[in-house]
Image (tube, rainbow, N blue to C red):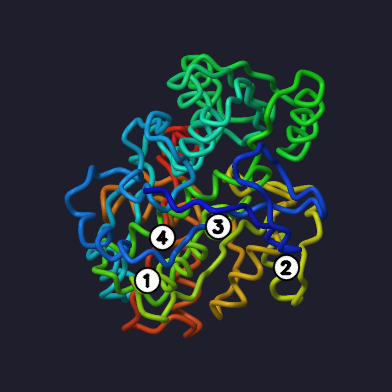
Amino acid sequence: MNLLTNLECGYCNKKLDAGKIWNLCPECGKPLLAGYDLNRADLETTKNNLSKREPNLWRYHELLPVQDSRFRLSLGEGFTPLIHAQRLGKQVGSNSLFIKDEGLNPTGSFKARGLCMAVSRAKELGIRDLSIPSAGNAAGALCAYASLGGLSAHVFMPNDVPRPFIAECRALGGHITLVDGLISDCGAKAAEEAGKFKRFDVSTLKEPYRIEGKKTMGYEIAEQMNWELPDVIIYPTGGGTGLVGMWKAFFEMSEMGWISSKKPRMVSVQSEGCAPIVKSFHDEKEFAEPWLDAMTIADGLRVPSAIGDFLILRALQESQGTAIAVSDEELLAGATTIGHTEGIFACPEGGATLAAFMRLRENGWIKSDETVVLFNTGSGHKYYHLWDK
């Protein structure tokens, strides 16, 4: 059973045939979202049988876009632990603080989810050559799944990306281009070459399926918390696919009757050196202006312009959430504190979520009795240089 029905533009609502190859909406150039038939009577049976399935993201296969099981590529991604951070919670004044540790995914980050899905669906649709701009983690994930699926991966990363990301891509068979500039410059170079060499662009939200892999984080949180969602989710936001994907998952589960109508307040955390979503949220804008001279030690947050900006801002508004920027010093201290209390070698982006939590507890936006999930989106091992001093 697969319930994929169509693709729909997240902005103008134009519907498209999911059996064809698409990047962005042909009408308005905005991201496309996958639609499903969520009224099937046997979906309740699916929910009740999840515990019998393999502990990876394909346990939700009916609600994912790959229609033929032969194309489900897997390195064991997904179903990462949701850790009750009791020692950390005691230190920061919370009895119900949890960490979703995405650093235990294949290739060491949450990017494995999205690229697993994008590459699997690309292979199913007959695509052979893939292209991506990346700050590092997405590049490694693309190379891994492309190699597993027998596809070609072309990655474009900033020249100053930490060296472990480059080594990872080389080891996994990727074709690497280093670009002077930011990820936006990498995106321009990747798009230029994709057009020239007929490669398929799997940039963040520039194809419909990475978000479907990321949405499984929302399904997992619900399942791991016995279908009672937390009060607050704090998520480090660069391109924002994970935040948008989880918000999509919560609406899907609500429509299927898997959860109640209560949904978490979503929090987007960025670095003070690159905070376009934070600024636009507080300015009550529909879209975010590109951030000039973006600079932060958290490479995954150094995204000056996100094509899905309106989807991120919409999720924050609909959830009655908020957006907050923290300093590089705060996010690095947050990652260190997580390591010292919970034994998790968090990436700097993960550390940003603790820094945001502490600010929001101090100003009363988060109450002491509320359940909060922090996302550590990757392993700190690729950022060892930040601690190697």
Residue 79: x and y in percent read 30, 48
Mark 1 / mark 2, whichever is N-terminal: 2
Callout 4–callout 3 Cβ contact below 8 Å: no
Task: Characterize the local packing of mark 4: few (<14), some (14-19) or many (20 or more) Cα atoms within 10 angstroms.
Answer: many
Residue type, mark 1 in image: Val
Residue picked out by circle 3: 35
Residue 288: x and y in percent read 77, 62
Left or right of 61: which side holds 47? left
Q: Give the residue displayed 47% in from the left and 85% down from the top.
A: 364
Circle 2 sits in a helix, a strand or a loop, which is it? helix
Q: How far apart in space, not on screen, are marks 4 and 3 (Cα)?
A: 16 Å
Mark 3 / mark 2, whichever is N-terminal: 3
Residue type, mark 3 in image: Gly
Q: Is residue 320 above or below residue 299?
A: below
Q: Nearer the viewer, mark 4 or mark 3?
A: 3
**Tag shown at residue 372:** 1
Mark 1 / mark 3, whichever is N-terminal: 3
Residue type, mark 4 in image: Gly
Residue picked out by circle 2: 279
Q: Nearer the viewer, mark 1 or mark 3?
A: 3
Residue picked out by circle 4: 218
Mark 4 / mark 2, whichever is N-terminal: 4
Callout 4–callout 1 Cβ contact below 8 Å: no
Using the rendered view, name the quadrant where residue 357 is placed: bottom left
Q: How far apart in space, not on screen, are marks 1 and 2 (Cα)?
A: 23 Å
